Image (spheres, grey):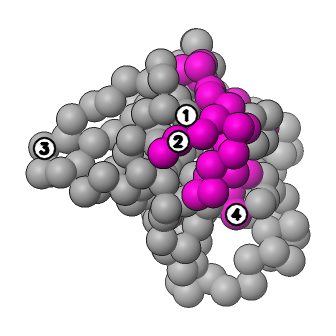
Amino acid sequence: MFNPKKNENNNSLGTYNSKYIDFENVLINNHKVILSKSDFESIHNKIDSTKTMIWECGSPFEWLDEEWMIKTYGNKTEESGAFDTFNGEITTLFGKDIEFNTNNNIVLFDKAFAKNNSFEIISHRIKLNKNTSLEDFKKMFPNSEMEILEERNEVRFRFYLNDKADDAFLFYFKKGKLNYFTLWWLLC
């Protein structure tokens, strides 16, 4: 049974009533969502592989790390809105059941499977992991809206980063348990 004062699976002290979660209020495996490259390398020493691809619709690094991007790639052009010499390449770093993206200056959380990872809302001491049931999630987040997915037995919940954009943390449940969570950006 769910107890908002203390839940053994989620260490929850209460409920979270907002439909917004600021990434400054989030920890992934007890670490910030955005890390400097050197901090990331000291924390995550088990990267299995990397893949560099061109992100044709832009990337969140354009505003999250704008000063470095301008210093490294020049100003944005008026007609395209792109940096003068940036080719759009972003590298994805793959670890055990977790993914990050980098522009070679900062590293940004992308996706993690709950099997080996946790998501924490610092302000409310809510920790989500593989033990988080759909029922407990609904009790901890009473104002969240569940989205039914095409895949059988899967649902999703969305928490926006702010009220000005569609960017959001998404939580996917499969067969009644938290399956994975991701930081999603509307880029195109």
Q: CA distance from mark 4 to mark 2?
A: 23 Å
Query: Which residue occupies the foreground of this view, 105 or 20?
Result: 20
**Main SS of residues in magenta:** loop
Q: Is residue 96 above or below residue 53?
A: below
Residue 10 belongs to magenta span: yes
Disc nearest the viewer among 3 and 2? 2
Query: Mark 1: which secondary structure?
Result: helix
Sequence-wise first label, 1 or 3: 1
Q: For the point 54% across and 20% down, which residue is it?
A: 19
Residue 14 belongs to magenta span: yes
Q: Is residue 145 above or below residue 135?
A: above
Q: Which mark is residue 150?
A: 3
Q: Is residue 63 above or below residue 50?
A: above
Q: For the point 77% across and 60% down, which residue is it?
A: 30
Q: Which mark is residue 140?
A: 1
Sequence-wise first label, 4 or 2: 2
Residue type highlighted by circle 4: Asn
Sequence-wise first label, 2 or 1: 2
